[in-house]
Amino acid sequence: MYKNLRLSIERKFLLTDEEWNFVVEKTEFIKLKKNEYLQIQDSNSSYEGFILKGAFKTYILNDNGTESVIFFSFENEWMCDIESFYHQKPTTYNIKAIEDSEILVINKTNKALLFEQVPKLLQFHILIVEKANIAIQQRLVDVLNKTSKQRYLEFIERYAHKIDKINNRNLSSYLGVSHEFLSKIKKRC
């Protein structure tokens, strides 16, 4: 079950079996059913996770009770509430399974121990953080400079294999448009 994680790491850095065993010792396997939470906004429970199977949405619940979806995450991707994880602050986001999912998680303490035991994982971690920063910046640029239609078309191109898992309410929230406007965009495409 950990095979995809090892493949993800070994695309950049080869691990000995001993090093791999440290990784397995420090991570925890979690199964979540659709609509179960990995993390709840304003809690003190934050993990970094690698998705083995399934899909998640990362979102905030606004003061008026509506959701603003920030990201979707799928198989073989990493996800984390970065500020909460690294600075041990209450969580900013909800992270919820949008289909039955399996994920490997690690807490900050175990991650620090893993870096001590397998120093090359620190280099791997830097690559993951760089990739996350690029994704966050690209999302911001897209929201500020692209039309809803452009963002929709790019999203369905990027996630063609997962678009059927995302309902219109979640997709319209992610795009920052009303459900009705999303329907109009879909009809025009």
Image (cartoon, grey):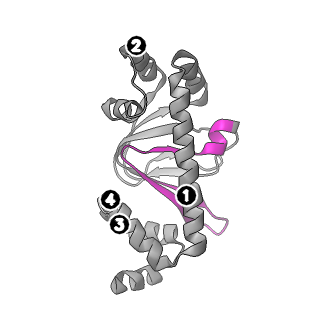
Q: What secondary structure is found at the residue carrying circle 3?
A: helix
Tags 2 and 1 touching, CB below 8 Å: no
Q: Residue at x 54, y 48 (%)?
A: 132
Q: Would residue 39 be visible to someone looking at this image?
A: no
Determine which residue is flagged by label 4. Answer: 162
Question: Quadrant of the rendered structure where residue 85 is?
Answer: top right
* Residue type at numbered disc 2: Glu
Of the 4 image quadrants, the one containing the N terminus is top left
Disc nearest the viewer among 4 and 1: 4
Tags 4 and 1 touching, CB below 8 Å: no
Q: Residue at x 37, y 51 (%)?
A: 34
Label 4 vs 1, first from the N-terminus = 1
Determine which residue is flagged by label 1. Answer: 59
- The numbered dot on residue 18 is 2
Q: CA distance from mark 4 to mark 1?
A: 18 Å
Label 3 vs 1, first from the N-terminus = 1
Q: Crowdedness of circle 4 by 10 Å Cα count: few (<14), some, many (20+)?
A: few
* Residue type at numbered disc 4: Lys
111 or 102, which is in the foreground?
111
Q: What secondary structure is found at the residue carrying circle 4?
A: loop
Determine which residue is flagged by label 3. Answer: 157
Disc nearest the viewer among 3 and 1: 3
Q: Position of residue 48 (x, y in %)?
A: 53, 38
Q: Residue at x 43, y 73 (%)?
A: 152
Q: Position of residue 55 (x, y in %)?
A: 38, 51
Label 4 vs 2, first from the N-terminus = 2
